Image (cartoon, rainbow, N blue to C red):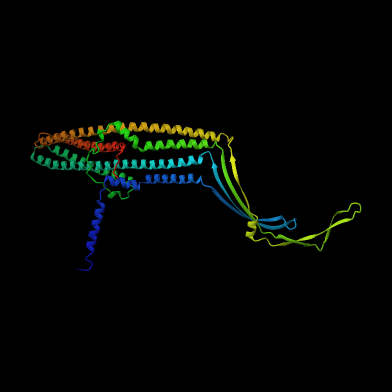
Amino acid sequence: MKKNSWIPLVLLFAFSLSSHAQTKKWTLEECVKYALDNNITIKQTELDTQSALIDKKGAIGNFLPSLNANASHSWNIGLNQDITTGLLQNKTTQFTSAGASIGVDIYKGLQNQNTLRKAKLSIIAAQYQLTKMQEDIALNVANAFLQVLFNKENLKVQNEQMGINKKQLTRSQELVDAGTIPRGDLLDIKATLASDNQNVITAENTLLISKLSLSQLLQLEDFENFDVEDGTEIQDENNILAQTPLSIYDKAKENRTELKIAQTNLEIAEKNVAIAKGSFMPTLQGFYNFSSRVAYADRVVGVEPNTANPTSIVGFVEGTNQNVLQPNFSPITGKADPFFDQFSNNKGQSFGAQLSIPIFNGFSAKNNVERSKVNLEKSKIALEQQSLDLQRNVYTAFADAKGALKSHESALVALESRQASYSYSKDKFDVGLMNSFDLNQSQTLLSNAQSEVLRSKYDYIFKIKILEFYFGIPIIKN
């Protein structure tokens, strides 16, 4: 084997892998799953769930004792009292103090309990909100996916029309050469072909934009090589239209996330009222404090006679006026006690309970209660409105799905008639019994009928998906 003869094989293998990667076509299920894993809005909503979990930890922490420690070291510079002489002197003294305190809520108007219950409800609400966001993203992806399919099939129709007109141009040239039709008809065919080319370009651009929209929804960067799988057929595999709007609505009331969110928000509002009412109740707190201190100044360890001034007069004997003397002593100072000895000897403790009874606080507590009651009423109205909106949306979706089915069926009938009409017109044109203008009119009507079939097809598919969505059938099956 020649030297480096393996290089072409490697390049061929790499090229085949690259071609395979570029020709990958995404299914609807793959698009939805990828969007749910990578969509930025969903990631932001997941962070809200994490915040709710942190709030729950904070609510649990309210039941635990609070423990705080403190320590300080100070220098007193200037005029200070000397502890050995009692005199004021300019000197520098140092002191160290330390302490710790523990506090615990014994009773707080059930505010801590209600705050914990509210935190648990907030987690549920955040999870429902995440589910709602995932459902909305899935529905948006399905709509964008079907739009790409529609634009792909529409491009095929436009290319087919241009192909037909190219053949018609060749046939018209033969008829003109044979003297069967006038040259003006040939010019009409050429103008129609130019118009078909513009339609193809427009369809290609529309397809590219729809792929871009879907790829952005999926957070894909390489949208130019992005494509979806063909072959989505129109069908109602779950026979959803056999249901009644009322049965779909009853099912939706059990499954729809927006109702669960509204119900949970109502329960949160009720807890807010209970928390606000708790501020009217007395609070009882237990406490324990510990402290100690250390001084670095010299201390008095004893006394000795004052030889310079051995006695001092403290009074007189009545009648004789004889002086009463007492011996004078001078203090003997030594170094300060060791640090830990002082810390142990100077320690102090206190403990007890503190009762606080709210009497008047500038209407703050009352206003909080009234405000929370207003929010509670808003939550009740929001829940009722969500139920009404859901009922209206279900009945509208059912009517839209049935209307889309009938529209598609009518479009199929119209297409069949337009195909027969065009075939008849083409036969007449080929034998010179119809001019090119009338043939083009017939072809335009056929093209419009084909486009209407495509539009009604994907409109029906999407509206069936919406109806199944309300019935609790997910966009994709797990």
Q: Residue at x 22, y 32 (%)?
A: 406
Residue 324 shows in the view = yes
Q: Is residue 148 left or right of residue 324?
A: left
Picture coordinates of residue 72, whole percent (x, y)? 61, 54
In the image, residue 97 sits, relative to residue 144, either above or below, namely below
In the image, residue 120 sits, relative to residue 91, either above or below, namely above
Q: Quadrant of residue 130?
A: top left
Q: Quadrant of residue 14?
A: bottom left
Q: Is residue 27 left or right of residue 190?
A: right
Which corner quadrant holds the C terminus? top left
Q: Is residue 178 left or right of residue 416?
A: left
Which corner quadrant holds the N terminus? bottom left
Q: Residue at x 43, y 40 (%)?
A: 121
Q: Out of 260 and 22, give the one closest to the viewer.
A: 260
Q: Out of 340 and 81, give the one closest to the viewer.
A: 340
Picture coordinates of residue 281, whole percent (x, y)? 55, 37
Picture coordinates of residue 350, whole percent (x, y)? 62, 48
Q: Quadrant of residue 13?
A: bottom left
Q: Is residue 226 left or right of residue 48?
A: left
